[in-house]
Image (spheres, helix red, strand yellow):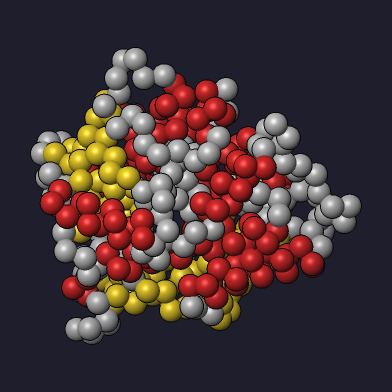
Protein backbone atom coordinates (compact mmCIF):
# COMPACT_ATOMS: atom_id res chain seq x y z
CA UNK A 1 0.00 0.00 0.00
CA UNK A 2 1.36 3.41 -1.00
CA UNK A 3 0.14 6.23 1.20
CA UNK A 4 -0.89 9.55 -0.28
CA UNK A 5 1.86 12.08 0.30
CA UNK A 6 0.96 14.94 2.61
CA UNK A 7 4.11 16.91 1.77
CA UNK A 8 3.53 20.52 0.86
CA UNK A 9 4.88 22.41 -2.11
CA UNK A 10 8.01 24.47 -1.37
CA UNK A 11 6.15 27.77 -1.26
CA UNK A 12 3.57 26.67 1.31
CA UNK A 13 3.35 24.56 4.42
CA UNK A 14 0.77 21.77 4.59
CA UNK A 15 -2.72 23.12 5.22
CA UNK A 16 -3.48 20.46 7.82
CA UNK A 17 -0.27 21.26 9.72
CA UNK A 18 -1.63 24.75 10.41
CA UNK A 19 -4.79 23.52 12.12
CA UNK A 20 -5.34 21.72 15.42
CA UNK A 21 -8.35 19.92 13.90
CA UNK A 22 -10.02 19.46 10.57
CA UNK A 23 -13.44 19.37 8.92
CA UNK A 24 -16.48 18.77 11.08
CA UNK A 25 -14.21 17.22 13.70
CA UNK A 26 -13.55 20.86 14.70
CA UNK A 27 -17.08 21.23 16.04
CA UNK A 28 -17.59 21.74 19.74
CA UNK A 29 -18.60 18.52 21.49
CA UNK A 30 -22.39 18.16 21.78
CA UNK A 31 -22.37 18.47 25.57
CA UNK A 32 -20.21 21.60 25.48
CA UNK A 33 -22.39 23.22 22.82
CA UNK A 34 -25.56 22.41 24.78
CA UNK A 35 -24.07 23.99 27.89
CA UNK A 36 -23.17 27.16 26.00
CA UNK A 37 -26.56 27.54 24.30
CA UNK A 38 -28.86 26.67 27.20
CA UNK A 39 -29.19 30.30 28.30
CA UNK A 40 -29.72 31.78 24.85
CA UNK A 41 -32.84 33.96 24.56
CA UNK A 42 -36.03 32.21 23.47
CA UNK A 43 -37.18 32.83 19.90
CA UNK A 44 -40.85 31.94 20.33
CA UNK A 45 -41.89 35.59 20.02
CA UNK A 46 -40.92 35.61 16.32
CA UNK A 47 -44.01 34.18 14.67
CA UNK A 48 -42.39 33.84 11.23
CA UNK A 49 -39.42 31.85 12.56
CA UNK A 50 -40.44 28.35 11.54
CA UNK A 51 -37.22 26.62 12.67
CA UNK A 52 -34.80 28.04 15.21
CA UNK A 53 -32.43 26.56 17.77
CA UNK A 54 -34.92 24.51 19.80
CA UNK A 55 -34.12 21.09 18.33
CA UNK A 56 -30.58 21.62 17.00
CA UNK A 57 -31.79 21.49 13.42
CA UNK A 58 -29.57 22.00 10.37
CA UNK A 59 -30.63 25.54 9.47
CA UNK A 60 -32.94 28.36 10.45
CA UNK A 61 -36.13 28.81 8.43
CA UNK A 62 -38.03 32.10 8.18
CA UNK A 63 -41.46 32.33 6.53
CA UNK A 64 -41.45 35.05 3.87
CA UNK A 65 -44.98 34.55 2.57
CA UNK A 66 -47.48 31.77 1.90
CA UNK A 67 -45.33 30.29 -0.87
CA UNK A 68 -41.75 30.90 0.26
CA UNK A 69 -39.58 30.45 3.31
CA UNK A 70 -35.92 31.43 3.62
CA UNK A 71 -33.44 28.75 4.73
CA UNK A 72 -30.32 30.27 6.34
CA UNK A 73 -27.22 28.54 7.62
CA UNK A 74 -23.48 28.99 8.06
CA UNK A 75 -20.75 26.37 8.22
CA UNK A 76 -16.97 26.64 8.20
CA UNK A 77 -13.98 24.70 9.45
CA UNK A 78 -10.25 24.07 9.23
CA UNK A 79 -8.66 21.90 6.51
CA UNK A 80 -9.34 18.19 6.33
CA UNK A 81 -6.92 17.74 3.39
CA UNK A 82 -3.86 19.61 2.11
CA UNK A 83 -4.97 20.24 -1.46
CA UNK A 84 -6.43 23.78 -1.35
CA UNK A 85 -8.93 23.27 -4.17
CA UNK A 86 -10.26 20.09 -2.55
CA UNK A 87 -10.47 21.83 0.83
CA UNK A 88 -12.64 24.54 -0.72
CA UNK A 89 -14.86 22.00 -2.46
CA UNK A 90 -15.41 19.97 0.71
CA UNK A 91 -16.21 23.01 2.86
CA UNK A 92 -18.70 24.37 0.33
CA UNK A 93 -20.48 21.05 -0.16
CA UNK A 94 -20.74 20.71 3.61
CA UNK A 95 -22.29 24.17 4.03
CA UNK A 96 -24.83 23.70 1.23
CA UNK A 97 -25.86 20.37 2.73
CA UNK A 98 -27.73 22.14 5.53
CA UNK A 99 -30.01 23.83 3.01
CA UNK A 100 -30.71 20.54 1.26
CA UNK A 101 -31.38 18.83 4.60
CA UNK A 102 -34.26 21.27 5.17
CA UNK A 103 -35.74 20.44 1.76
CA UNK A 104 -34.52 23.74 0.34
CA UNK A 105 -32.92 24.88 -2.89
CA UNK A 106 -29.80 27.03 -2.44
CA UNK A 107 -29.96 30.47 -4.05
CA UNK A 108 -26.94 32.38 -2.73
CA UNK A 109 -23.68 31.89 -0.82
CA UNK A 110 -21.28 34.19 1.00
CA UNK A 111 -17.70 33.12 1.71
CA UNK A 112 -16.20 32.99 5.21
CA UNK A 113 -12.41 33.23 4.94
CA UNK A 114 -9.80 33.26 7.69
CA UNK A 115 -6.22 32.63 6.55
CA UNK A 116 -2.69 32.91 8.01
CA UNK A 117 -1.48 35.22 5.28
CA UNK A 118 2.11 35.03 6.52
CA UNK A 119 2.19 31.27 5.87
CA UNK A 120 0.00 30.72 2.80
CA UNK A 121 0.57 32.22 -0.62
CA UNK A 122 -2.15 34.20 -2.41
CA UNK A 123 -2.28 31.41 -5.00
CA UNK A 124 -3.12 28.83 -2.32
CA UNK A 125 -5.82 30.99 -0.75
CA UNK A 126 -7.22 31.71 -4.20
CA UNK A 127 -7.37 27.97 -4.93
CA UNK A 128 -9.41 27.38 -1.76
CA UNK A 129 -11.93 29.99 -2.85
CA UNK A 130 -12.00 28.60 -6.38
CA UNK A 131 -12.74 25.14 -5.03
CA UNK A 132 -15.67 26.46 -3.05
CA UNK A 133 -16.94 28.46 -6.00
CA UNK A 134 -16.80 25.36 -8.23
CA UNK A 135 -19.14 23.47 -5.90
CA UNK A 136 -21.48 26.45 -5.67
CA UNK A 137 -21.52 26.63 -9.47
CA UNK A 138 -22.46 22.94 -9.59
CA UNK A 139 -25.31 23.74 -7.20
CA UNK A 140 -26.39 26.65 -9.42
CA UNK A 141 -25.63 29.44 -6.95
CA UNK A 142 -23.19 32.36 -6.92
CA UNK A 143 -20.69 33.19 -4.22
CA UNK A 144 -21.89 36.78 -4.06
CA UNK A 145 -19.65 38.18 -1.35
CA UNK A 146 -18.30 37.34 2.06
CA UNK A 147 -15.77 38.39 4.67
CA UNK A 148 -12.07 37.67 5.22
CA UNK A 149 -9.67 38.01 8.14
CA UNK A 150 -6.04 37.22 8.90
CA UNK A 151 -6.20 34.29 11.33
CA UNK A 152 -3.76 31.90 12.97
CA UNK A 153 -5.40 28.81 11.44
CA UNK A 154 -6.89 28.46 7.94
CA UNK A 155 -10.68 28.58 8.01
CA UNK A 156 -13.09 28.46 5.10
CA UNK A 157 -16.82 27.98 4.69
CA UNK A 158 -20.03 29.59 3.57
CA UNK A 159 -23.15 31.37 4.62
CA UNK A 160 -25.72 29.52 2.52
CA UNK A 161 -29.21 30.78 1.78
CA UNK A 162 -32.03 28.87 0.14
CA UNK A 163 -35.75 28.81 -0.47
CA UNK A 164 -38.39 26.21 0.37
CA UNK A 165 -42.18 26.15 0.38
CA UNK A 166 -43.38 26.60 3.98
CA UNK A 167 -45.47 23.42 3.72
CA UNK A 168 -42.48 21.37 2.58
CA UNK A 169 -39.88 22.26 5.19
CA UNK A 170 -38.03 19.18 6.42
CA UNK A 171 -36.90 19.11 10.05
CA UNK A 172 -35.33 16.67 12.49
CA UNK A 173 -38.32 16.76 14.86
CA UNK A 174 -41.15 15.16 12.87
CA UNK A 175 -40.21 11.48 12.63
CA UNK A 176 -42.98 8.98 13.41
CA UNK A 177 -42.84 5.64 15.20
CA UNK A 178 -42.18 2.82 12.76
CA UNK A 179 -40.29 4.97 10.25
CA UNK A 180 -37.44 3.34 8.34
CA UNK A 181 -34.10 5.15 8.66
CA UNK A 182 -32.17 5.64 5.42
CA UNK A 183 -28.53 6.80 5.39
CA UNK A 184 -27.45 8.17 2.00
CA UNK A 185 -23.63 8.15 2.36
CA UNK A 186 -21.26 5.64 3.89
CA UNK A 187 -19.51 6.47 7.17
CA UNK A 188 -15.80 6.83 7.90
CA UNK A 189 -14.80 10.34 6.80
CA UNK A 190 -13.20 11.12 10.15
CA UNK A 191 -11.20 7.91 10.17
CA UNK A 192 -9.96 8.47 6.62
CA UNK A 193 -9.02 12.08 7.34
CA UNK A 194 -7.16 11.02 10.49
CA UNK A 195 -5.28 8.42 8.45
CA UNK A 196 -4.39 11.11 5.91
CA UNK A 197 -2.89 13.28 8.63
CA UNK A 198 -0.87 10.28 9.80
CA UNK A 199 0.37 9.45 6.31
CA UNK A 200 -1.51 6.13 6.34
CA UNK A 201 -4.15 6.75 3.68
CA UNK A 202 -3.63 5.09 0.29
CA UNK A 203 -4.82 6.43 -3.07
CA UNK A 204 -8.07 4.44 -3.01
CA UNK A 205 -8.90 5.74 0.45
CA UNK A 206 -8.15 9.33 -0.55
CA UNK A 207 -10.38 9.03 -3.60
CA UNK A 208 -13.15 7.61 -1.43
CA UNK A 209 -12.75 10.53 0.97
CA UNK A 210 -12.87 13.18 -1.73
CA UNK A 211 -15.70 11.58 -3.72
CA UNK A 212 -17.90 11.37 -0.64
CA UNK A 213 -17.22 14.80 0.84
CA UNK A 214 -17.62 16.72 -2.43
CA UNK A 215 -20.90 15.05 -3.45
CA UNK A 216 -23.78 17.47 -3.04
CA UNK A 217 -26.78 16.29 -1.00
CA UNK A 218 -29.04 17.86 -3.63
CA UNK A 219 -31.52 14.97 -3.41
CA UNK A 220 -32.72 16.66 -0.21
CA UNK A 221 -34.67 19.27 -2.16
CA UNK A 222 -36.75 16.45 -3.69
CA UNK A 223 -37.62 14.89 -0.35
CA UNK A 224 -39.97 17.66 0.78
CA UNK A 225 -42.31 16.66 -2.03
CA UNK A 226 -41.92 12.92 -1.45
CA UNK A 227 -44.78 11.03 0.17
CA UNK A 228 -43.87 9.36 3.44
CA UNK A 229 -40.74 11.38 4.23
CA UNK A 230 -41.24 12.63 7.78
CA UNK A 231 -37.87 13.93 9.00
CA UNK A 232 -34.39 14.60 7.61
CA UNK A 233 -31.03 15.72 8.96
CA UNK A 234 -27.49 15.52 7.69
CA UNK A 235 -24.83 13.52 9.48
CA UNK A 236 -21.83 15.71 10.26
CA UNK A 237 -19.61 16.43 13.25
CA UNK A 238 -21.60 14.62 15.94
CA UNK A 239 -21.49 11.32 14.06
CA UNK A 240 -24.36 9.03 13.11
CA UNK A 241 -25.39 8.38 16.71
CA UNK A 242 -25.35 12.05 17.66
CA UNK A 243 -27.49 13.24 14.79
CA UNK A 244 -29.88 10.31 15.12
CA UNK A 245 -30.31 11.22 18.79
CA UNK A 246 -31.28 14.74 17.69
CA UNK A 247 -34.08 13.20 15.60
CA UNK A 248 -35.12 11.05 18.56
CA UNK A 249 -35.14 13.99 20.98
CA UNK A 250 -36.98 16.27 18.61
CA UNK A 251 -39.58 13.59 17.79
CA UNK A 252 -39.90 11.98 21.27
CA UNK A 253 -38.92 8.56 19.93
CA UNK A 254 -36.34 5.83 20.29
CA UNK A 255 -34.45 4.22 17.43
CA UNK A 256 -32.87 0.88 16.60
CA UNK A 257 -29.99 0.71 14.12
CA UNK A 258 -27.59 -1.85 12.72
CA UNK A 259 -24.10 -2.09 14.12
CA UNK A 260 -22.81 -2.42 10.55
CA UNK A 261 -23.91 0.62 8.49
CA UNK A 262 -22.25 1.24 5.09
CA UNK A 263 -18.58 2.25 5.37
CA UNK A 264 -16.25 4.08 3.01
CA UNK A 265 -13.52 2.07 1.35
CA UNK A 266 -10.68 1.44 3.78
CA UNK A 267 -12.46 2.81 6.84
CA UNK A 268 -12.98 -0.54 8.56
CA UNK A 269 -9.36 -1.65 8.21
CA UNK A 270 -8.09 1.68 9.52
CA UNK A 271 -10.55 1.70 12.42
CA UNK A 272 -9.54 -1.86 13.33
CA UNK A 273 -5.95 -0.63 13.36
CA UNK A 274 -6.85 2.06 15.91
CA UNK A 275 -7.18 5.10 13.66
CA UNK A 276 -9.76 7.49 15.08
CA UNK A 277 -10.33 11.20 15.71
CA UNK A 278 -10.41 12.94 19.06
CA UNK A 279 -13.91 14.13 18.18
CA UNK A 280 -15.17 10.55 18.15
CA UNK A 281 -14.30 10.16 21.82
CA UNK A 282 -15.74 13.57 22.71
CA UNK A 283 -18.95 12.67 20.92
CA UNK A 284 -19.32 9.43 22.87
CA UNK A 285 -18.63 11.18 26.17
CA UNK A 286 -21.38 13.69 25.34
CA UNK A 287 -24.22 11.31 24.52
CA UNK A 288 -23.14 7.75 25.30
CA UNK A 289 -25.56 7.52 28.23
CA UNK A 290 -28.43 7.59 25.73
CA UNK A 291 -27.02 4.79 23.55
CA UNK A 292 -27.32 1.07 24.25
CA UNK A 293 -24.56 -1.02 22.68
CA UNK A 294 -24.21 -4.81 22.57
CA UNK A 295 -21.71 -5.99 25.16
CA UNK A 296 -19.68 -7.68 22.45
CA UNK A 297 -19.44 -4.62 20.17
CA UNK A 298 -15.75 -3.82 19.62
CA UNK A 299 -14.49 -0.30 20.25
CA UNK A 300 -13.63 0.27 16.59
CA UNK A 301 -17.28 -0.19 15.60
CA UNK A 302 -18.38 2.28 18.25
CA UNK A 303 -15.75 4.72 16.95
CA UNK A 304 -17.29 4.54 13.47
CA UNK A 305 -20.79 5.18 14.83
CA UNK A 306 -19.51 8.34 16.57
CA UNK A 307 -17.06 9.26 13.79
CA UNK A 308 -17.43 12.94 12.76
CA UNK A 309 -18.60 13.12 9.16
CA UNK A 310 -17.45 16.11 7.16
CA UNK A 311 -20.03 16.72 4.40
CA UNK A 312 -21.75 13.47 5.39
CA UNK A 313 -24.94 11.98 4.07
CA UNK A 314 -28.59 12.62 4.81
CA UNK A 315 -30.41 10.61 7.46
CA UNK A 316 -34.02 10.18 6.37
CA UNK A 317 -36.96 8.99 8.49
CA UNK A 318 -39.59 7.66 6.09
CA UNK A 319 -42.77 5.62 6.46
CA UNK A 320 -41.87 1.95 6.21
CA UNK A 321 -44.16 1.35 3.24
CA UNK A 322 -42.39 4.11 1.27
CA UNK A 323 -38.83 3.14 2.21
CA UNK A 324 -38.04 1.11 -0.91
CA UNK A 325 -39.27 3.89 -3.18
CA UNK A 326 -37.29 6.60 -1.39
CA UNK A 327 -34.19 4.39 -1.28
CA UNK A 328 -34.56 3.85 -5.02
CA UNK A 329 -34.84 7.61 -5.60
CA UNK A 330 -31.71 8.28 -3.54
CA UNK A 331 -29.72 5.63 -5.40
CA UNK A 332 -30.91 6.99 -8.76
CA UNK A 333 -29.35 10.30 -7.75
CA UNK A 334 -25.96 8.62 -7.44
CA UNK A 335 -25.85 7.63 -3.76
CA UNK A 336 -24.83 4.04 -4.39
CA UNK A 337 -24.02 3.29 -0.74
CA UNK A 338 -27.47 4.38 0.51
CA UNK A 339 -29.13 1.82 2.76
CA UNK A 340 -31.86 1.29 5.33
CA UNK A 341 -29.96 1.15 8.62
CA UNK A 342 -32.74 0.93 11.20
CA UNK A 343 -36.10 2.23 12.37
CA UNK A 344 -37.76 4.50 14.89
CA UNK A 345 -39.84 3.01 17.71
CA UNK A 346 -41.95 4.36 20.58
CA UNK A 347 -39.97 5.16 23.70
CA UNK A 348 -37.66 7.70 25.33
CA UNK A 349 -35.05 9.52 23.25
CA UNK A 350 -32.35 6.91 22.96
CA UNK A 351 -30.71 4.67 20.39
CA UNK A 352 -30.22 0.92 20.57
CA UNK A 353 -27.52 -0.58 18.37
CA UNK A 354 -28.30 -4.15 17.28
Q: Quadrant of residue 195?
A: top right
User: 8 or 268, which is in the foreground?
Assistant: 268
Residue 300: percent from left, percent from top: 47, 24
Q: Is residue 143 above or below residue 314?
A: below
Q: Among all residues in the image, which is located at the extreme right?
A: 10
Relative to 65, is 133 on the left or the right? right
Question: Which residue is found at the position 22% from the left and 57% from the top?
Answer: 325
Q: Quadrant of residue 143?
A: bottom right
Residue 53: percent from left, percent from top: 31, 58
Relative to 6, is 347 on the left or the right? left
User: 199 or 202, which is in the foreground?
Assistant: 202
Quarter of the image with the N terminus in it: top right
Relative to 146, is 154 on the left or the right? right
Quarter of the image with the C terminus in it: top left
Residue 114: percent from left, percent from top: 66, 62
Q: Quadrant of residue 218?
A: bottom left
Q: How many marks?
A: 0
Question: Which residue is found at the position 45% from the left and 38% from the top?
Answer: 263
Question: Which residue is found at the position 54% from the left and 64% from the top?
Answer: 92
Q: Is residue 81 above or below residue 31?
A: below
Is residue 54 in sight in this rendering?
no
Is residue 147 in sight in this rendering?
yes
Question: Which residue is found at the position 62% from the left and 42% from the top?
Answer: 204
Q: Among all residues in the image, which is located at the extreme top?
A: 296
Residue 235: percent from left, percent from top: 39, 48
User: 267 or 353, which is in the foreground?
Assistant: 267
Relative to 39, is 94 on the left or the right? right
Amino acid sequence: MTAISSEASPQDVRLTSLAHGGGCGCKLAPAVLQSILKCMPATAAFSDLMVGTATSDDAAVWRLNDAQALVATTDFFMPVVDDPFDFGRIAAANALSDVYAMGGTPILALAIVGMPVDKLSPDTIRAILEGGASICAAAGVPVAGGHSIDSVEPIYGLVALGLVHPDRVLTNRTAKAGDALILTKALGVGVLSAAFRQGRLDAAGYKSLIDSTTKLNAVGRELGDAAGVHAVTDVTGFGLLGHLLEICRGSDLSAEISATPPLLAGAEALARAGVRTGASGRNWASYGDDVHLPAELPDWKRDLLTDPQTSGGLLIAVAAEEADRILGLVRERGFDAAAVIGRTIPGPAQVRVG
